[in-house]
Image (cartoon, rainbow, N blue to C red):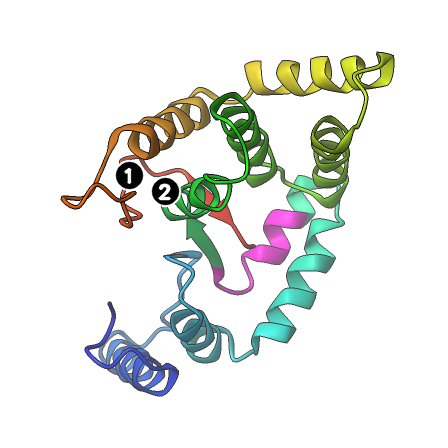
Amino acid sequence: MVTSDHTTTSITNMLRHMREKYEHKYKEDLRFKTIVSDFSWATMHAILEVFNRETIEDYSKRIFDVSQLTDLVAVDRSLRKKTSITSCVSHTMARFARSVKKVANEDQRTLAMYGFSLLLNCLDLNSIGNVFRIISFVFLSKKQNLSFKKNFDDLNQLVETRPIYVRNCVKQVIIYNNQAKDDDGEEPTSDEDNCGDSQDKFG
């Protein structure tokens, strides 16, 4: 929580006040390269207004344009101009895990979560499209034919070669959702998991 009153107006006013005080004291712009959010729309609107002077729509279009770049130097140069927002991987994975909890068995949920973790770590639209196509083919195929087997093998290969911190994070979320219970025996509602500093980047 940034403020006790979790509204866009309150958060915007607090962040603007903080920025003005900083710039008055240090005589330089206050700018953050990246801010991690728990996907609060109020917080994201306020961050973009105060530090970027842009709307969610403006930001989305700009990030979409950046995601089509293939030159990482050009991507970095573009992103450095303004603050980027990232979503905490812990919160993102926990939300996704709950969304598939009742629509798939344990093996399917595990593969779906590993597949989703691949999407979280894609750096451009082309990679997202390729991974999404494979995931869609595996989970939407009605028959386990040769095409299904190829895509299933491709998905497992991608899962096996993803970064170690992603593997650890997914395992922690799986363990949390499979074992943790509230006092009344219901599934846990907390989003908190210890997944280090990995982030799902929105920019």
Q: Residue at x 58, y 56 (%)?
A: 79
Near mark 2 (Cα within 10 A), the count class, few <14, some 14-19 or many ≥20, is many
Residue 167 x, y percent position in the rendering: 44, 22
Near mark 1 (Cα within 10 A), the count class, few <14, some 14-19 or many ≥20, is some
| Residue 76 part of the magenta segment | yes
Q: Residue beneath label 1, please?
A: 193
Q: Residue at x 19, y 78 (%)?
A: 4
Q: Which of the pair 105/38 is nearer the observer?
A: 105
Q: Are marks 2 and 1 in contact (CB under 8 Å)?
A: yes
Q: Which of the pair 75/3 is nearer the observer?
A: 3
Check the image and report above or below for 134 versus 160: below
Q: Residue beneath label 2, please?
A: 90
Viewer can see residue 132 = yes
Quadrant hosting residue 27: bottom left
Is label 2 in a helix, a strand or a loop? Answer: helix
Three-letter amino acid code at disc 2? Ser
Magenta segment: 75-84
Check the image and report above or below for 172 versus 185: above
Residue 71 x, y percent position in the rendering: 73, 41
Label 2, label 1: how far apart the Cα atoms are: 5 Å
Does residue 76 appear left or right of residue 187 in this picture?
right
Q: Residue furthest left?
A: 183
Please state the total of marks drawn on the protein image: 2
